[in-house]
Image (cartoon, rainbow, N blue to C red):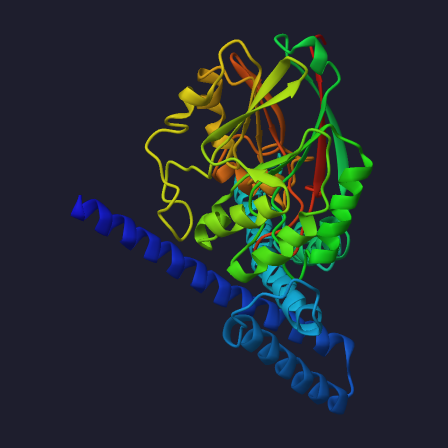
């Protein structure tokens, strides 16, 4: 066991070192590229020197702010330093690292293509007469000239494509993370009592209050939610990010949520990491929002009811920077909360609990956690999402024998204030007995 732990720590250290080296390489790569572009575009030596000094000063300020002088407390409104320093730093970090990865990928693919075609090009150089074509000629269309031209084209194409993450990052900062969508999802539950036909449940998840998802923005999300007039509202965790003190602001921002059959929620991994599970539960309770922690609560319409179950965040690996929340078996002990014969609905931040929930006969699971990938390319291929590293249930509806799952894309962001191909989402579920 000691050797296994040592190996895991060594592997983690190796991965961290590899990322650090790649990050350094990305900075060198883009500094060289920018200097070359500047040399070609600007001829005035005084202007060149001024741009060099300004560029170095800006680079140092952004990185000192980003990696060094960081406030302990996280603001819950957009401050001047967040807008002018933190956002550009995170945009640059995102674009530069991902941009080098794109460049290396494209260059690697083109070099492989060139290498695979080399034997055919060599064969074509020999004519049917058995004589070799000249290796050099003054003709612009000669094979000797065509090959370097093609290589230069591919190199320029790789450089152009490597700038795409910067463009995507800017889109994600200024538009993607604010482009709120409302999804209406019909859920067919054959066991649903007749009194609940057409019953609507609204879900919010992953608020992550901070300078890029402010208290005022969350308050507007709550107002939009109320205007949709759901019968019941659920909130499924990650209200804060790293700063425990922000729990007061996020609870205050969500306190306006109103629904005839109540507002219920569960906790996420960030409540565990900030040690706010108990305190935020009490704060929500004081505002009429019931956080279910390994608890169930029947929701009645007359004598008919559905059973609402909520659990704290659970993972089968030591997820993130804390071992808390680690379980050997998902939803252990939840079987006693399931009401046989009733429709059971589970609030679980982590969608990976779905398989076990279906085994327990839980009709519907509502989850979040993934942010829908946050920065994804699922419109190209469903596998192009970073969230697939942690779960097969990234976004949207899933079904299997025993139950259904919907994974909400969330409202806020983590690490980078960027969303691409994963807009923030309010989900409204419309329950029905028949399709």
Q: What residue is shown at x 41% (from left), y 20% (from top)?
A: 335
What percent of the width, then of the height, locates residue 420? 69, 46
Q: Please tell me how many numbered marks the rendered image carries.
A: 0
Residue 125 shows up from this direction: no
What percent of the width, then of the height, locates residue 348? 52, 33
Q: What residue is shown at x 67% (from left), y 50% (from top)?
A: 143
Q: Quadrant of the C terminus?
A: top right
What percent of the width, then of the height, locates residue 126? 59, 40
Q: Residue at the left extreme?
A: 2
The one of 25 and 348 positioned closer to us in this rendering = 348
The one of 46 and 413 positioned closer to us in this rendering = 413
Q: Is residue 139 above or below residue 233?
A: below
Q: What residue is shown at x 45% (from left), y 17% (from top)?
A: 360
Q: Quadrant of the N terminus?
A: top left
Which of the 4 image quadrants contains residue 130?
top right
What percent of the width, then of the height, locates residue 84? 70, 72
Q: Is residue 254 above or below residue 396?
A: below
The one of 21 and 301 positioned closer to us in this rendering = 301
Residue 217 located left or right of residue 404: right
Q: Residue at the right extreme?
A: 227
Residue 1 shows up from this direction: yes
């Amino acid at each position: 066991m000691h050797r296994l732990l040592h190996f895991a720590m060594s592997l983690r250290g190796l991965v961290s070192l590899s990322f650090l080296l790649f990050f350094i390489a990305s900075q060198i790569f883009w500094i060289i590229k920018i200097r070359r572009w500047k040399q070609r575009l600007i001829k005035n030596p005084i202007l060149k020197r001024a741009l060099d000094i300004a560029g170095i000063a800006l680079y140092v300020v952004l990185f000192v702010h980003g990696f060094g002088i960081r406030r302990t407390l996280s603001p819950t409104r957009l401050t001047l330093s967040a807008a002018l320093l933190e956002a550009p730093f995170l945009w640059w970090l995102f674009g530069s690292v991902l941009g080098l990865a794109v460049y290396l990928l494209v260059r690697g693919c083109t070099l492989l293509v060139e290498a695979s075609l080399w034997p055919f090009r060599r064969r074509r150089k020999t004519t049917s007469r058995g004589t070799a074509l000249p290796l050099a000629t003054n003709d612009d269309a000669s094979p000797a000239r065509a090959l370097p031209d093609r290589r230069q084209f591919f190199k320029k194409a790789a450089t152009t494509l490597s700038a795409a993450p910067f463009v995507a990052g800017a889109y994600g900062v200024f538009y993607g993370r604010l482009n709120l969508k409302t999804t209406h999802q019909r859920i067919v539950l054959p066991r649903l009592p007749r009194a609940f036909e057409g019953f609507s449940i609204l879900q919010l998840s992953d608020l992550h209050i901070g300078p890029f998802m402010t208290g005022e923005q969350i308050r507007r999300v709550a107002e939009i939610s109320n205007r949709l007039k759901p019968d019941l509202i659920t909130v499924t965790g990650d209200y804060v990010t790293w700063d425990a003190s922000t729990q007061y602001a996020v609870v205050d921002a969500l306190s306006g949520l109103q629904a005839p059959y109540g507002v219920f929620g569960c906790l996420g991994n960030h409540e565990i990491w900030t040690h706010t599970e108990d305190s935020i539960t009490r704060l929500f309770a004081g505002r009429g929002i019931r956080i279910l922690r390994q608890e169930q609560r029947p929701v009645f319409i007359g004598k008919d009811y559905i059973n609402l179950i909520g659990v704290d965040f659970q993972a089968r690996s030591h997820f993130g920077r804390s071992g808390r929340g680690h379980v050997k078996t998902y939803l252990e002990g939840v079987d006693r909360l399931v009401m046989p014969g009733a429709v059971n609905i589970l609030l679980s931040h982590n969608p990976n609990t779905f398989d076990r929930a279906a085994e327990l006969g839980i009709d519907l699971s509502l989850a979040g956690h993934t942010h829908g990938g946050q920065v994804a390319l699922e419109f190209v291929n469903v596998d192009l999402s970073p969230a697939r590293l942690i779960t097969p249930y990234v976004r949207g509806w899933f079904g299997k024998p025993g139950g259904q799952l919907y994974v909400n894309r969330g409202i806020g962001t983590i690490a980078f204030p960027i969303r691409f191909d994963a807009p923030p989402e309010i989900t409204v579920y419309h329950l029905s007995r028949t399709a």
